[in-house]
Amino acid sequence: MDTPIVILNYKTYLESSGLKALELAHDLESAANESGITMVAVPQAADIFRISEETSLPIFAQHIDPISPGGHTGSNLINTLIDAGISGSLINHSEQRMKLADIDEVVKLCKENNIESCVCTNNIETSKAIATLSPDAVAVEPPELIGTGIPVSQAQPEVVEDTVKEVKAINKKVKVLCGAGITTGDDMKAAMDLGADGVLLASGIIKAESPKDALLDLVSKL
Ligand code: G3P
């Protein structure tokens, strides 16, 4: 995982679904090329293949189920997602919480399949617990700030700073990202100044009039 990194979670906004997901991927790709900063698209499962065919962006899944191939219905199987084009996945997003044992299983599945794992957490304590599983990254996001436009890096800097300190004390190799409300260049710079390796964000870019301009502003102070 190259850092600094910007991971854009498409969630299920209409502005980032279907054909619009592809348009957003083109914006992400040109912002990444112009800025030289690594940017990752995290579309819904149904949009992964199209984006992978049409761009050279790194793509993460929003969720992988802790299952093996066989008799499951309506699940996200890691093998199929890899065939579709992912090189990593979010795990345990606040909007898709998982049991600890299932998080452990999916982190292991990612390692076995050589793809990157970014486990989302809601506070410093859960970040410490997840660091012991040695994922590639932990992304701390206070749930109450998600989608509010109030940036965690400025509103709750201690959450970012202490998560970095505690996670690195457990395993230096685990990257620490932060998210919730991150929108502007100042928000991302504040995150990096607190020791984060990058940001995980959604609405500030997806809802912007020009997502590409918003992405370029996001990384303008690095
Ligand atoms: O996964 C990113 C996320 O939950 C933050 O959302 O809209 O506050 O950037 P948002």
Image (cartoon, helix red, strand yellow):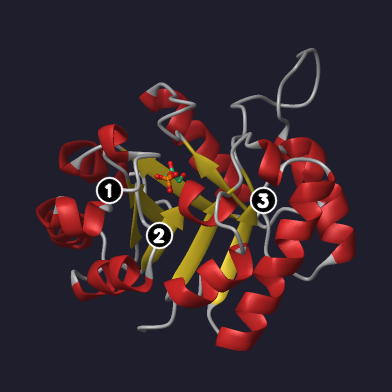
Find residue 128 and name its label.
none
Cα gap from disc 3 to disc 2, whole angstroms: 33 Å
- Of the image marks 3 and 2, the number of the one nearer the N terminus: 3
Residue 186 location (% of width, % of height): 29, 72
- Of 108 and 146, nearer the camera is 146
Q: How many marks?
A: 3
Q: Residue flagged by tag 3: what amino acid is it?
A: Asn
Between disc 1 and disc 3, the foreground one is 1
- Which residue is under mark 1? 150
Q: Is mark 2 within 8 Å of ligand 1?
A: yes
Q: Is mark 1 within 8 Å of ligand 1?
A: no
Residue 217 location (% of width, % of height): 46, 75
Packing grade of label 3 (10 A; few <14, some 14-19, many >=20) is: some
Q: Quadrant of ligand 1?
A: top left
Packing grade of label 1 (10 A; few <14, some 14-19, many >=20) is: some
Q: Quadrant of the C terminus?
A: bottom left
Residue at 31 percent across and 43 percent down: it is 141
Find residue 113 and name its label.
3
Check the image and report above or below for 195 versus 100: below
Question: In terms of secondary structure, where does tag 3 sit?
Answer: loop
Residue 97 location (% of width, % of height): 43, 25
Residue at 81 percent across and 41 percent down: it is 18
In the displayed orientation, state which residue is furthest to the front: 209
- Which residue is under mark 2? 183
- Of the image marks 1 and 2, the number of the one nearer the N terminus: 1
- Of 2 and 208, nearer the camera is 208
Question: In terms of secondary structure, where does tag 2 sit?
Answer: loop
Q: Residue flagged by tag 2: what amino acid is it?
A: Thr
